[in-house]
Amino acid sequence: MREPLAESPEVREPLAEKPEVMKTSVLSVFNALLERLPKADASDLHLVAGLPPRWRIHGELEMCEGRIWHTPEMACLAETLLSEVRTKMLAETGSADLGHSAGGHRFRIHFFRSMGRLALVARYLPDRYASFSELLLPPEIRELAWLPFGLVLVTGVTGSGKSTTLASITHEINANQTRHIITIEDPVEFVHHSIKGLVSHRELGQDTPDFATAVRASLREDPDVILVGELRDTETMRAALTAAETGHLVFSTLHTGDATGAAERFLGAFPGEEQAMARHRLALVLKAVVAQQLLPRADKAGRAPAVEILRGTPAVLNLIASNRTSQLYSAMESGSSLGMKTYDQSMAELVRKGIVAMETARPLSRNPEGFALLAQKESSPENAHERRK
């Protein structure tokens, strides 16, 4: 753990005394701090007025060497980075987001207030699009990039790798297909430069007022693929369904822990009188739900994703349409031949391959008693081949 030099004079003193110098000084020091994240293999930087900086490395929060940031400096940084619209948002709602580049790297920055003090979290967005195998994502995820139309939901808690997975899928489409991809984000995280495809980025607060308006407008922008950063409200969900129904491939995220929860959360967002219609519409367009969680690797070299996959098979879609979402887990559990898998099955595979330790995965499993047997089971010739290598 890196302990800050909390008593040294340079930590205690403000960054700059003169207002005309402060903006340049604050931004320079902040950018230098951000540039350290990739070198330290850190995913997030935390700054809170009056406290030493911290960063997250392989899922663990640690102190990092650096000066304490004071309230005037944090306020100056917010004023320097935030647009007029986002400054107003911070004042009215207590939080605001933006994308920021420093040292050739991209970061998502979230300002917020904590007990009256200004704070921020900066998330490092990797510069290159890692391959699906490098990310340890199953091949079924890559296949989603080649769907002609429909709705794909990627779910998981904050920091579970949803954005990285969607960036890799977007890159797969952009690099290999002649399709127009529109991303609608708050803020734009991964910036894709058009390769074989054409990529248009739209950012809330700068290019559009909200997700729902942008999704509806995108239908007049000749899209093939629409990436909606988050399904935050019912209006956006309605717009996403319409886009998928009209022949577009739509990707989006939800903050739920598992795949079945995503379907229930989506449908639960609609008022009672719309529930039946929402189930019918979702059953017509849903192609897949992907849920992720990151587990510490056994070799301490970062984290590995456990991935749950629910495919929109006729049986699954019938369960959704007939309001039997409680049976989705059983369908997923028995649907491995159709490209589906549960968290337990995914974690068992990681344990068999030696990527994740048994003591890490077992407490997280749905059935800890039976998980050890599942992790030892050679479920396919491919698994047996992996173990013999």
Image (cartoon, rainbow, N blue to C red):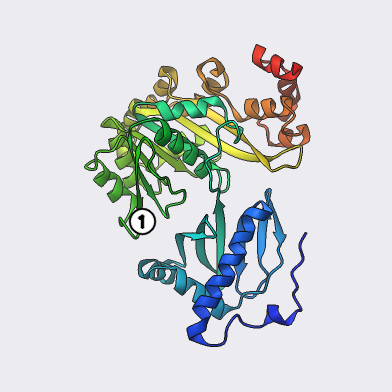
Mark 1 secondary-structure assignment: loop
- Residue 180 spot, x, y in % from top left: 31, 38
What's the amino acid at mark 1?
Leu
In the figure, residue 171 lies in which quadrant?
top left
- Pick the front one: 197 or 185: 197
Q: Is residue 314 above or below residue 241?
A: above
Q: Quick one: which residue is furthest to the top in this view?
A: 381
Q: Nearer the viewer, residue 179 or 378?
A: 179
Expressed as whole percent of the image width and height from the top left, the position of residue 338 reads: 50, 17
Most extreme residue toward the left, as rendered? Answer: 220
What residue did someone put label 1 on? Answer: 204
Q: Is residue 207 left or right of residue 305?
A: left
Residue 1 against residue 135 in the figure, above or below: below
The quadrant of the rendering that contains the C terminus is top right
Does 56 sit left or right of 175 as displayed?
Answer: right
Residue 316 image position (x, y, % from top left): 44, 22
Q: Is residue 362 left or right of residue 227?
A: right
The quarter of the picture where residue 182 lies is: top left
Crowd rating for badge 1 (residues with CA inside 10 Å; few <14, some 14–19, many 20+) = some
Does residue 18 appear to the left or right of 144 in the view shown? Answer: right
Identify the image quadrant of the N terminus: bottom right
Tell me which residue sits at (50%, 36%) in the image.
Answer: 261
Please say whether residue 117 is visible from this viewpoint: no
Can residue 275 be spotted in the picture?
yes
